[in-house]
Image: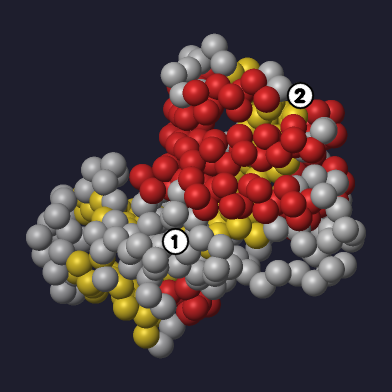
Amino acid sequence: MHIDSHFDSGNIDVVEILPGNRANLRIKKDAGDEHMQWFYFRVDGVRDQACTLRILNAGQASYPKAWDGYRVCTSVDRQTWTRVDTKFDDGILTIEHRPQGQMQWYAYFAPHTHEQHLELLSECQLSSLVTIDRLGATVDGRDLHRLVVGEGTLQFWVIARQHPGESMASWWMEGFLARLLDPDDAIARRLREMVTVHVVPHMNPDGAIRGHLRCNAAGANLNREWETPTIKRSPEVFFTLEAMDISGVDFCLDVHGDEELPYNFLSGAEGIDGYDTSRLPHLCEVFSTAYERANPDLQREHGYPVDAPGTANMTMCTNAVAARFQCPAYTLEMPFKDNANAPDPVFGWSPERSAHLGASGVDALVHLAQAFTDAE
Ligand code: ZN
């Protein structure tokens, strides 16, 4: 048995390999920070043999409660990721599995690597409907790209992967961009007429390559940097906010994954000053209702507690952008586990369903754009 994680988005330390195809493993912390939960590694040489893989420090992960009801993702070809029963006892996450491949891959969620991100950008640029520009450089010097689609007067922003371990956000982007750029889709065409859509598909490429859960290469949790981003610590946020100031923002959607809750849900900016008496509640209601109708994998019953007025955490994108531009804004959370309202025993919450939810975002955005027009 041999175990390796030295590749794009890989994360695991091998503590020891024991007789009987048993391995003790540890998840590495994000560089410069305490966060850890994402893992992605390959097991070689034990096809069709019973293996026991134990992650010894799972109990010290950022969200230890998230292991309850969690099932690990595994793949032979890195295309199809199925789920395997996983146990969490005494702080140790145990995977008992017979690899079907000579090389078997395991991950916290189906990975969406930096190479896949570059492929997505390359595919998108073939469309005459998109302009791609570079907002700036990340801490490690990678390019931070923005896609601009549409010619409308409204300025909508959609960003993803502030938290690099939340790979479902990139799968969402795959579905969203494919539909947004579909020349034959009349809803997408309507959106492109009414709105200029600014898309940052990957806010944290450094963190993703490094196999981080939450942080960039400087150890900054980007979704806690929106009050006072700096070029040194959080250039990814600094340059995005700079571009937002130039375009203006009429709506912002920030796409994430949640470790604990087995649902898709939206989280709003109810806690910012003056929210209740503004036009924002109405516009948010239009968007969230339309999204739920367009795709029932999104629900509005379960989610984070709503912030009381005046208690918003202004370091988070949704609150900071809603307050700065007096615009509706949402964080979208998808599960690592599954949608408990429509569980899938084979795949759990999957790249495919994330992509469908992304495609449905186009429907919700059109309804929101229409609400702006109606209000004029
Ligand atoms: Zn997140």
Q: Tag on residue 153? A: 2
| Crowd class of label 2 (few under 14; some 14 to 19; many from 20; radius 10 Å) | few
Quarter containing the C terminus: top right
**Residue 130 in sight from this viewpoint:** yes
The x, y position of residue 352, in whole percent, is: 36, 45
Quarter containing the N terminus: bottom left
Q: Amino acid at mark 1?
A: Phe
Q: In this rendering, is residue 50 above or below 126? A: below
The x, y position of residue 114, in whole percent, is: 49, 37
Q: Kindly report the distance in space between the C-alpha atoms of the residues bearing marks 2 and 1.
A: 36 Å
Task: Name the residue located 71 percent from the left edge and 39 percent from the top edge.
Answer: 371
The quadrant where residue 119 appears:
top left
The x, y position of residue 214, in whole percent, is: 60, 57
Residue farthest along the top direction in this orientation: 128
The x, y position of residue 194, in whole percent, is: 68, 25
Task: Name the residue located 50 percent from the left edge and 70 percent from the top edge.
Answer: 260
The residue that label 1 is drawn on is 336
Q: Amino acid at mark 2?
A: Thr
Task: Name the residue located 84 percent from the left edge and 68 percent from the top edge.
Answer: 309
Q: In this rendering, is residue 117 above or below 151? A: below
Q: In this rendering, is residue 225 above or below 91? A: above
